[in-house]
Amino acid sequence: MDREILLEVKNLKVEFGAKKNKFTAVDGVSFHIYKGETFGLVGESGSGKTTIGRAIVRINEISDGEIIFKGKKISGKIDPQLDKEITRQIQMIFQDPIASLNERSKVDYIVSEGLYNIKNYKSEEERKQKVAKSLMDVGLLPEFASRFPHEFSGGQRQRIGVARALIMEPELIIADEPISALDVSIRAQVLNLLSELQREKGLTYLFIAHDLSVVRFITDRVAVIHKGKILELADTQEIFKNPLHPYTKALLSSIPLPDPKRERKKKLIEYNSNIHDYSIDKPKWVEIRHGHYIFGNEIEIEKWKKGLK
Amino acid sequence: MNKILSVDDLVIKFKLRGRILTALRGVSLEIFEGETLAIVGESGSGKSVLAKSFMGLLDNNGWIDSGSILYDRKDIAKYKNEKEWLTIRGKEIAMVFQEPMTSLNPLKTIGKQVEEAVELHQGLRGNDAKNEVITILENVGISNPQSRYSQYPHEFSGGMRQRVVIAIAIACKPKILICDEPTTALDVTIQAQFIKLLKELKNKYNLTIIYITHDLGVVANIADKIAVMYAGDIVEIGKCEEVFYNGQHPYTWALLSSLPQLGIKGQPLYSIKGTPPNLFYDIKGDAFAPRNEHALKIDFVERPPYFDVSPTHKARTWLLDQRAPKLEPPQSIRLLRKEWEAK
């Protein structure tokens, strides 16, 4: 069965600065996201994961490669009509619900801002209805529209952030570390909310995170990114069963286990990129098993193949 | 083991916009030399307030209403002025805060900032001080300390900055090191390395550690003892294994089962309903009762006392009363227990 591909990122390169100060944040990244799935992008800070998200929503300009959404190229110079279209269809949820909500605006305005920008409503009444509906969708009361962000708890604020994305009726939501800044007890609420909304509305998520334990729980497929390059990509279950790349193994070993005996026995793996000898034998992006991709050179691929379970 | 700090029935209040908030509602705690105590709870549970009260760092609108904090046979809860506190702060008890960038001075080199503490607390000067700084930087895992010495905080990554903060704390040669959410702002990989470092330092410098976090998942490795706090009260305290594998308070269960590590894929993750109680009002009964789906009638009427589970483990829940109905903990906790018993 061929699944519909919603978003395709091909050979994406994002650079900052120019000439001497040039820094390549994302270096030749390719992946695709199927409609209706949750795709995880995992890496440490500075790995370029956020930059990829921002490049997709056209905040960061790309230097090379292309991004294709529903069969149309959305990177580089595009038609203003299409620009408006994808502004609606691709929405973002941010990490810090305190920093990402304007403290001087009422919830009503915060949630409607996207609507105002693309004039996606006919009357004031319709706009208000939309705000009320999206607030209810995220488990808040419509009355909350007249309040300010500081009147809400961290979890509620993140719900406002989700409502603001939902009101645009997007197809793809890029959730950039949506729970990292929240208390553990509230993380669960937000994760459940995202899963629920996905079931109800058939949403597709690009879930950006540094914590593999969250990713294991919520994503269908996951890509591990390090210093601007994707090193391994597979079904979430496969990655947890068959982590091949040493960096993936290091990330897995750093998940804190809520189990003292196992946690104390656990060996922490630290990743050092010097272990790869890519001087002669250059690394390639290889499908090592159906749906399981990895970045390595021929010797490594041979070795990893033997380790597959 | 020697008792190093003992807190008895500590009540701390704050005055906010003319109203009085009770942040700690009678906390008692004993900490022994060389042990690592983890204090776990949601934001607003009072875990940071408790730790700050050990160093006289409560905000100006807060005060110790009653109770005592005994350190080295002195009741430091009675300390009033900075002069008294300076005999404790840094020298005896040092603290590492959450966000390393806000605890470092962006205008001073890393070396100078550690050196300040070395000069003040170890009385070293000139080259001696500098050598000591370099040793400490090396001990906290900063490579090339010689050249790193003259760099500024912005030239360090988040994890490295946190190592500098810990270097400053250690330069004071404290007996107790308080870490207040030291890894919350950091990546998991860095977090794991930081905890490993903390364990090494503990042995090297004979530290007693108080580790504050909202994430029970993080402390399994480092804690000897865990205190679970809710609404200004310790609801359960015990050895690390006891709290993880044989937790008794429904709030402990709730904290554990909301961890994605224990979640079962495809099923919604357990989440705690409602919000913590408003501490401006008096709390009747068990503070967690309104959010606890298994709450008993008495939970709304009378505050439960501590029931002993073992000599080192006690919990404040009526479920442990003989008359209470037997209640099964949630599935994820049962699985955790089974795995433990199987070994």
Image (spheres, helix red, strand yellow):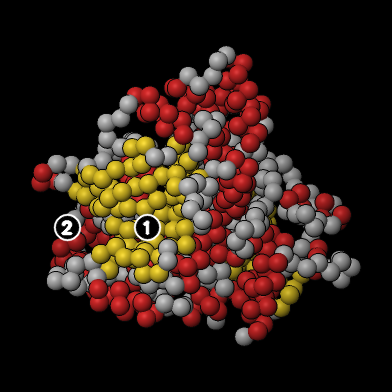
Identify residue for label 1: A43
| B57 shown above or below A236 | above
Pointer 1 chain = A
Q: In the rendered structure, which amino acid carries the disc numbered 2?
A: Ser
- Quadrant for residue A243, please give it: bottom left
Q: Is residue A256 rendered to the left or right of residue A201?
A: left
Q: In the rendered structure, which amino acid carries the disc numbered 1?
A: Gly
Find residue A203 and report its horizontal and vertical position in percent: 54, 43
Q: Is residue A36 rendered to the left or right of residue B318?
A: left
Identify residue for label 2: B150
Tell me the residue at 45%/44% (across/down).
A6
Residue found at the far left of this picture: A20
SS category of the residue bearing label 1? loop
Q: Mark 1, residues whose alpha carbon is within 10 Å: few (<14), some, or many (≥20)?
A: many
Q: Which of A119 and A77 is in front in this view?
A: A77
Find residue B75 and report its horizontal and vertical position in percent: 56, 62
Residues tagged 2 and 1 counted as in contact (Cβ below 8 A): no
Residue B181 visible to the viewer: no
